[in-house]
Structure formats: C-alpha cells, structure tokens
Image: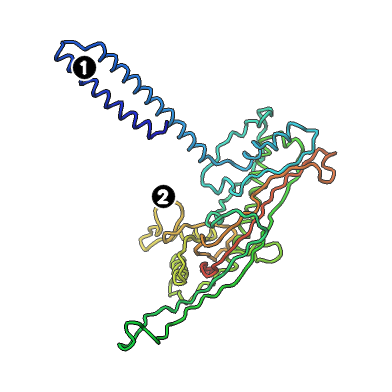
Amino acid sequence: MTIEEIKAALEQSNKDLLAAVSQRDADLKNLGKVQDETKVKIDQILCEEQKIKDDLADLTKKVNEQRSGSQERKSPSDIFVASEQYKRLVASPGEKRSGPVLVKSFAPWLSGKAVTSDPTSAGPGLPGPMRIGIFQEPRIQLRVRDLLTVAPTTLTSIEFVRTTFTNAAAMIYASPAQSPYFENVEKPESDLKMTLATEVVRTIAHWLAASKQILMDIGQLRSIIDDELMYGLRLVEEDQLLFGDGTQANLNGIATQATAYDTNLNVQDDTKIDKLRHAILQARLAQYSVDGIVLNPADWHDIELSKDGDKRYIIGDPRGQVGPSLWGRPIVESDSMTTGDFLTGAFRSARLYDREEAIIETSDSHDKFFTHNMVAIRCEERLALVVPRPQAFIYGSF
C-alpha cells in the first residue's frame, strides 16, 4: 500500500469506529448493555486500525532509509574498495592485478558534508584490524567546479556556437498618411553574429608506485586514493578551470577568456568590496547576472577583517556560521587565484563536460613491478570546458 492508500484506510477506519461507538452508546441506552455483535465489530475495527498504523510506520521507516541512503556521499576509496574489480583483485593474487574503477569526479571535500567511514574496518574478505594509514597535511576545499554546469559527454571534442547580439529594436514612428499600416517605414536591423568554436576533451592523470601489500591494507589504500591521487587530480583541475591557456594539453580556462575589468568604474578610496560590486555591475550591464566570485584566500581574509569607523566588522559577526558570500553571491576561495586578483561572472553559463569521470586503476605490469611485488595505482579523468559567453565573466585586479 502507498502512503495515500494507508491514509485513506485510516480515515475510513475512524469513520467505522465512530459509527460502532455510536451503536454501543445506543445499545447501552436502549438495552442497558452492549450487544455481542457490537463488541466484536469494535474489536475488529481496532485490530484493523492497529495493523494499518503498523504498515504506515514500516513504510515511513523504509522511505527514511532510502532518503538517508540516497544522501550518503561515499569517498573515492569507499567506491574502490567496494567494487567488484577490487574484490577480484584481492581474491585472486595469482592473476594479473589490473582493472579500472570509476570513482566519480566529485571528491568528498567538495560536498560540504563529511564522509563517515570506519578506517579500521577491513574490506570484503580482508583481515582487521589494521595499522593506521598515512598522515597527510590538511586539505583545502576546491569548489570552482561546483559553480559550473556539469554534464556528461561521449565525444572527444565539443562544438558550440558563440553568439554576439546587437539589439537595434526601437519604437517606430509613422505619419498619419502611413498609419495604421506602417507602409514604407524603415525598421532598424539587429545583428546576430555566430562563431563556431571547438573545445577538445583533455586528460588529467598521474600515478603512484606502491607495494603489493597496500592492496590488503585498507587504511593506507584509502589514504593513497583520497588524500593523494584524487586530491592531486583536483589541484590541477582547479588551476586548469581558471587559468588553462587552451594550448596543447591544457583546458581553455575561464579567467583566460574572461572580459577585463573596466577600471573606469573605480572611484577614489574604493575598497576591495567596492571593486567587486563594480565588477558585478559590469557583467550586469552586459546582460549577465553574476552567480559567484572567486578570490584568493588572502584577499577574502582582508575583506572579512574589514571594519567601519567604530571597529565593527563590515560583513558580519565573526561567530556566524553562514557560508562566505558577498553582495548576495557565494565566495569561492581558491589558491589557484593570484593574490590581488578576482573573477566574477555567470558561472552557470559555462559548461564542464565529463568524458570520463575519475578512474582508479591498478596494475603490476609496469617495469619490474611483478617480480618486485609492486603495483602502480593510476588516477585520471577526461573533461572539456566550454565558455560560450566570455563576456559573462569579469577578471581583474584590486
């Protein structure tokens, strides 16, 4: 039964119960006692109602479990360790140790939600407990990808059209002799220029050498996948999304294509906050609505510490837990952004195409790895960045 059906059944049960109770009261008034058939009917209704309530509780529990499961974010190492390829890899040590595993492009540090997993628990068929994995340095959050529209693709290159529209629409005057037909009246001509462009799918990849025993040590394997391979991939991706120069193996980055900030908008004694608002206006005057701002952490630090004449923080209470934002737009801190520079724009107008989401692959076929009990663990992704409206982005300096 669906929730709607259960609710309808409960409503009907309540009506039946009210009718039975009314009959009971009538029996007591007219006969001085409750008839046996009325008692049986009330008992049946109460039993059926309890069963319906139990069904509703079970269904609600299942729905909540499904929602909880769908919201759970797994790390790349969680996916890798749970994969069939990994199970076969550790179950058959005599076979060739290779096989790709798709671990998705969104690493857990992008989700804003901590991934909960027990680092001491063993994988399928593996012994536990195990020694503590590698200690890594604290990792920064990389979120430029989160600002973009992301879509899959099966192509090796993306063709798209850049358009430039000149709007000449205007009110038309007609003399009384021409009215109301506007005959022989010249109308202004608007202009729409279309330019065909192509962005090629690029590859970001790297690998690490590890001992064969690493495959049996889930703690260290998780550290290598999440904290080294995937994180290293994201560092390069972040830099490419912003500043790839479009040559050879590089993406054509957003800041590389963006419109230069118009310094004529500056006025005397402008602060960093003021200049960012000028940049938002510049994009708006080009008919684009800014939905994000990318800053170097040092510049955001300066903005957050800005105070008024009474030494009060300008942008809010330091104890606040609200995510970083300015002028109603989210702030993305990126080490890839040069100190003193900024990028604003309509990030959703850009498209990031995943040709091949991040894949982890292992093999002992490299060099003398088979005889030396070594394995190579490779991580790579293939993607293309399309910026159909460069004028939607403003890149400049404070």
For marks 2 and 1, the one nearer the N-term is 1
The reply to whether the C-beta atoms of the residues labelled 2 and 1 are less than 8 Å apart is: no
Q: Viewer-proximal residue, 69 or 283?
A: 69
In the picture, measured across the screen, residue 173 lies left or right of residue 84, that is left
Residue found at x 36% / y 83%: 182
How far, Cα to Cα, is label 2 from label 1?
Answer: 61 Å
Residue found at x 17% / y 14%: 28
Q: Looking at the image, can residue 264 be seen?
A: yes
Q: Viewer-proximal residue, 38 or 158?
A: 38
Residue 24, label in figure: 1
Q: Viewer-proximal residue, 31 or 202?
A: 31
In the picture, measured across the screen, residue 218 lies left or right of residue 33, that is right
Name the secondary structure under disc 2: loop
In the picture, measured across the screen, residue 269 lies left or right of residue 85, that is left
Residue 100 occupies quadrant: top right
Locate the N terminus and report the quarter of the image it occupies: top left
| Residue situated furthest left in the rendering | 30
Q: Looking at the image, can residue 271 be seen?
A: no
Residue 4 occupies quadrant: top left
Position of residue 33 measured from the top left corner of the image (x, y, whole percent): 19, 10
Residue found at x 27% / y 23%: 17
Residue 320, label in figure: 2
Residue found at x 69% / y 48%: 379
From this view, report whether residue 71 is shown above or below residue 295.
Answer: above
